[in-house]
Amino acid sequence: MAENLDQLAEQIAVAVAQVSGARTVPGLYRPLLRLLARGAPVALDDLATAAGRPPAEVRQAVAGWPDTEYDHAGRIIGYGITLPPTPHRFTVAGHPLYTWCALDTLIFPAIIDQPADIESPCHATGAPVRLTVDPTAGITRLDPATAVVSLVVPEQRCDSVRAAFCNQVHFFATAAAAGDWVAKHPGMTVLPVADAYRLGRPLIDGLLDTAAPTPCC
C-alpha cells in the first residue's frame, strides 16, 4: 500500500507540475496563499511585496495562470484558497474561506502555517465531513472517521489544473458511499483521509522549497 501510495503521489506531483500555474512557482504561490488566508482580495503589488519580486515580474507571471480568480478591481480572490464559496469550507483564524478541492484542505495548513477547520459534504450523500488539520501535527480531528478522498492523475497536457484535477477530488463519508461515483468515473482512486494527507506531502514539500524566497507575511 505504501509503495502504491508513493507511486500515486509521484504521478500526481509530476502531472500537476506540468500544468502552467501558480503551483509551479512556489516563490509566488506560497505568499499568495498566505495573503488569501487573511480573507481579503490580494492586490498584485501586495503579492509582489510579499514575494520580494518586482511588480512587473509578478504581473507577467500571474497573467499566465489560467485558473486565477479576480474581483472587479483586478485583485486575486482565488487560487487554491478562494473567497467565493465552493463545497469545501476552509476556516482559518475565523476567516470563512474555501478551497478548490478536498486535497487542498489537507495540504494548505502546512503551507500557510496555520490550522484550519474544514467542512465539506459527502459528494454522494451530502452528509457533512468535518476535520481539523494542523500545520505540524496533521489531521487532529476527523468526523466521520471512515471518510475518504477521491483522487485522479491529471492528463499531462491539460490547461487547467482545476478542471483536470481539483473538480474530481471530493470527500465521501465512506468508501462504500463513493462506490457508485467511482464506478461512473474511470481512473479514480479512493483513499482514506489519512492516506490522502500522506500522499499530499510531496506537494507540500515542493511548495515549501527552501530555495524559494521567504515571504514577508
Image: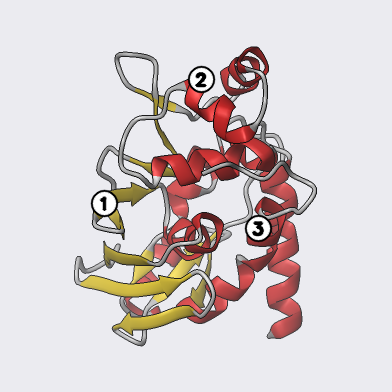
**Mark 1 — residue?**
95
Q: Secondary structure at mark 1?
A: strand
* Position of residue 115 measured from the top left corner of the image (x, y, whole percent): 40, 67
Viewed as shown, does residue 142 lie left or right of 165?
left
Q: Position of residue 208 (x, y in %)?
A: 67, 55
Label 1 to label 3: alpha-carbon separation: 24 Å
Note whether 55 is above or below 102 in the view shown.
Answer: above
One can see residue 185 in this view: no
Residue 174 in which image quadrant: bottom left
* Colour setup of the view: secondary structure
- Whichever of callouts 1 and 3 sits on the residue coming sooner in the sequence is 1
- The amino acid sitting under disc 1 is His
| First reached walking from the N terminus: tag 2 or tag 3 | 2
Q: Is residue 95 left or right of residue 78?
A: left
**Which numbered disc covers residue 176?**
none
Q: Nearer the viewer, mark 2 or mark 1?
A: 2
Q: Which residue is mark 3?
A: 203
Please name whichever residue, 213 or 151, is drawn nearer the observer in this view of the structure. 213
Report, in whole angstroms, how far the alpha carbon at label 2 lies from the one at label 1: 22 Å
Residue 105 pos. (x, y %): 43, 60
